[in-house]
Image (spheres, rainbow, N blue to C red):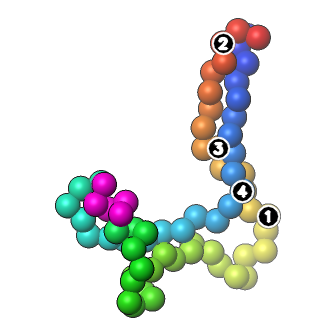
Amino acid sequence: MNQYVITGTKTFTYYKTVVASNIVDAHIKAHEPVEDPIDDWSLDYDEEYDDPIPMVVKHIEDEGEA
């Protein structure tokens, strides 16, 4: 059997849409301040939803045989 390290997170996910020429440009533009709040980061969260935040697995690393 192998041993695995699993990384998970229980945080909110934020979204932002930018128009860019490539992925580097998009990353830079994502962190620039905006004039219109509608163009800023948005949170996919419903305040009436009161269940616990689910765990999301972000990374699994195989460390080989245990």
Asked which secondary structure carries label 4, the reply is loop
Q: Amino acid at mark 2?
A: Gly
Residue 49 x/y as whole percent: 73, 76
Residue bearing the label numbered 4: 10
Residue appearing at x 32%, y 62% in the figure: 26
Look at discs 1 and 2 and give the one toward the viewer. 2
Q: What is the spatial separation of the Cα atoms under label 2 and label 4, in whole angstroms?
A: 27 Å
65 or 47: nearer the viewer: 65
Q: Alpha-carbon neighbours of circle 3 within 10 Å: few (<14), some, or many (≥20)?
A: few
Q: Amino acid at mark 1?
A: Pro
Residue bearing the label numbered 3: 57
The quarter of the picture where the N terminus appears is: top right
Residue 61 x/y as whole percent: 62, 27
Quadrant assignment, res 22: bottom left
Q: Amino acid at mark 3?
A: Val
Q: Residue 52 got which mark?
A: 1
* Up/down of 49 relative to 11, above or below: below
Q: Residue 64 got which mark?
A: 2
Asked which secondary structure carries label 3, the reply is strand
**Where are the magenta residues, as a range?**
24-28
Q: What is the spatial separation of the Cα atoms under label 2 and label 3, in whole angstroms?
A: 19 Å
